[in-house]
Image (spheres, rainbow, N blue to C red):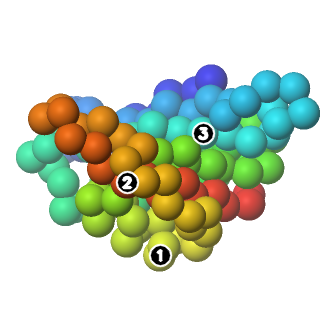
């Protein structure tokens, strides 16, 4: 497992991060998974793109062969746009695969990219 951070060089503030880890074990242990976060007041400044690109490089460096996202929420249009730009492949749609805080369900769209 690896945690990467994005730091504002002017203020020293952590503005984004990712956690990279195996998606599974054994014969699927070459597939990685990651979670991302960008500070709410810093969104729209390409920090997400920075952390995803850094994650891709780190995953390859560590020896993973694939980066897979199991649950990209369909309403997360910024993430969907970024993953398309970076060359990820959508694997389909899982209807109502994500439970929202309000108790409703939203579709999820798994993605992957070969490293």
Asked if labels 1 and 2 touch by Cβ distance under 8 angstroms, the answer is: no
Left or right: where does residue 86 sit relative to residue 107? right
Q: x%, y% of residue 115?
A: 74, 58
Q: x%, y% of residue 55?
A: 55, 46
Farthest residue in the right direction?
27
Q: Nearer the viewer, residue 58 or 95?
A: 95
Residue plotted at (18% across, 33% down): 103
Q: Which mark is residue 100?
A: none
Under tag 2, what secondary structure? Answer: strand
Query: Counting other residues with Cα less than 10 Å from the Cα at mark 2, is it few (<14), some (14-19), or many (20 or more)?
Result: some
Which dot, 2 or 1, sits closer to the camera?
Answer: 2
Quarter assignment of residue 17: top left
Q: Is residue 86 above or below residue 95?
A: below
Quarter of the image with the N terminus in it: top right
Q: Earlier in the sequence, mark 2 or mark 3?
A: 3
Residue where numbered disc 2 is placed: 107
Farthest residue in the left direction?
41
Under tag 3, what secondary structure? Answer: strand
Quarter assignment of residue 82: bottom left
CA separation, marks 2 and 3?
19 Å
Q: Earlier in the sequence, mark 2 or mark 1?
A: 1
Q: Is residue 66 above or below residue 36?
A: below
Left or right: where does residue 85 sit relative to residue 25? left
Which dot, 2 or 3, sits closer to the camera?
Answer: 2
CA separation, marks 2 and 1?
21 Å
Q: Is residue 115 visible?
A: yes
Residue where numbered disc 1 is placed: 85
Residue plotted at (58% across, 27% down): 2
Residue plotted at (73% across, 51% down): 66
Q: x%, y% of residue 76?
A: 29, 57
Residue where numbered disc 3 is placed: 33
């Amino acid at each position: 497992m690896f945690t990467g951070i994005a730091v504002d060089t002017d203020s020293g503030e952590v503005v984004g991060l990712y956690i990279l880890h195996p998606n599974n074990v054994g014969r699927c242990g070459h597939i990685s998974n990651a979670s991302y976060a960008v500070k709410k007041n810093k969104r729209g400044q390409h920090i997400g793109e920075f952390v995803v690109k850094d994650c891709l490089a780190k995953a390859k460096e560590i020896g993973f062969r694939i980066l897979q996202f199991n649950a990209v929420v369909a309403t997360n249009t910024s993430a969907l746009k970024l993953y398309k730009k970076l060359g990820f492949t959508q694997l389909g749609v899982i209807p109502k695969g994500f439970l929202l805080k309000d108790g409703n369900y939203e579709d999820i769209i798994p993605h992957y990219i070969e490293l």
